[in-house]
Image (cartoon, rainbow, N blue to C red):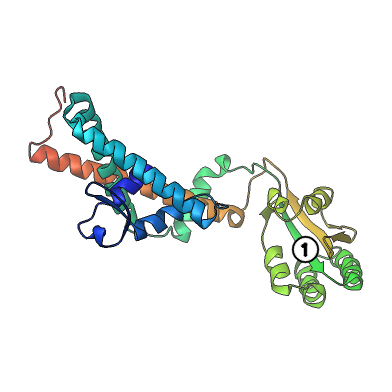
Amino acid sequence: MGAFLFLMGCGDNEEQDFVARVGDRYLTQHALQEAISTLPRGLNGSEAKRQVIESWVSNALLAQEAQKRKLADNPMVKSLIEESTRSVLIGALLDKVNEESLPEPTPTEIATYYQQNINNLLLKEDYVRIWYIRTNDKNKAESAKNEMTQALKQSGSTAETAWKRIANSYADDKEAALTMSYHYLPESRFEDTSERVLAVLSGLKNNEVSEIENIGGTWHVIGLVERAKTGSKPKLAWIQNEIRQQLRIRAKKQRYATFLQELRSKAMSQKTLEIKGE
C-alpha cells in the first residue's frame, strides 16, 4: 500500500491540497481518502488516517534516501526497475485488451459444447428440483404440506398446475417459490439458506414432502420433485450458465493467443524480432 500511495502523490498541482510532503512528493487529500477506502473495515477514521499517512511518509523517506544514494544506478536495481516497469506495462496492456467486449456465446454454441463434452460434464454433486414454501403462518404451512403431498402423486402439467396454485395460496414470496421450482439446483446451494434446510432436503426421496419446520420463526415446507445423483449426466438447462462461462474463458484465451500472434507476425515482418534457430 505504501509504494502505491507514494506514486499517487506526485502530480504537478498536488501541492495545492496535501496532507503530507516529503521533498517534492505530496500526499493529497484525494489520495488519502482513496487509500483509506482500501483498509480493512473496523478502523476508525482517525486511526485509518494515521496509518495511511505514516505508511506514505515512511515510504517517501526511504525512496528519497535511495535516490540520494543513487541506488537507481546500481545495475541490479536498474534491472529490477526495468522488469517491474515492463510487468506493469504488460498488465496495463492486457487489461486494455480484455476491456474490449467479447460476443456472448450463442445458444447453438452452448448446445454444441454440451454435446461434445457431455461425458466430461457429469454432475459433481446431487442436483435437486424442489417445491419450497416459506411462510410465517403455521396453518398455511400445514395446508401447503397436505396439498403438496397430493400434487406430487400426480404427474406432468396436472402436478405443475397444482403447484402454482399452492405457491400462490401459501408462500409469503410467491414469485421466489415459483422461480426456484423451475430449475434443478445444486444441493449445496441450500447450505447458504440454512444447514437445517439442507438436512431436511438431504433426507427426502423423490416425490416426498417434508414435515413443516420452524426455522428462525419462519415455517418451511419442502417437496422433492426429483434428485439427480452425483455422476449422472446433467440436462443442458441445468448447466448452461457454467458452459456459457467456460466459453467466455475460452474466447478470452483465444483472443490473447490471436493478439500475441499478430504482434509476433508484425515484429517478424518489421525485422524487430529475431529468434535464432527458428
Inspect the image, locate mark 1, and give the three-letter code of the amino acid beneath it.
Answer: Trp
Q: Is residue 1 visible?
A: no
Most extreme residue toward the left is 271
Circle 1 sits on which residue?
A: 131
Q: Position of residue 250 (x, y in %)?
A: 41, 46
Q: Nearer the viewer, residue 43 or 260?
A: 43
81 shown above or below 239: above
Q: Is residue 37 left or right of residue 237?
A: left
Q: Is residue 242 visible?
A: yes
Q: Nearer the viewer, residue 77 or 55?
A: 55
Q: Position of residue 128 (x, y in %)?
A: 72, 53
Residue drawn at the location 41% of the way across and 53% of the way down: 35
Q: Quadrant of the N terminus?
A: top left
Residue drawn at the location 21% of the way across and 49% of the way down: 24
Q: Is residue 196 left or right of residue 146?
A: left
Q: Position of residue 232 (x, y in %)?
A: 67, 43
Q: Position of residue 115 (x, y in %)?
A: 52, 48
Residue drawn at the location 18% of the way across and 26% of the way down: 74
Residue 261 found in image quarter: top left
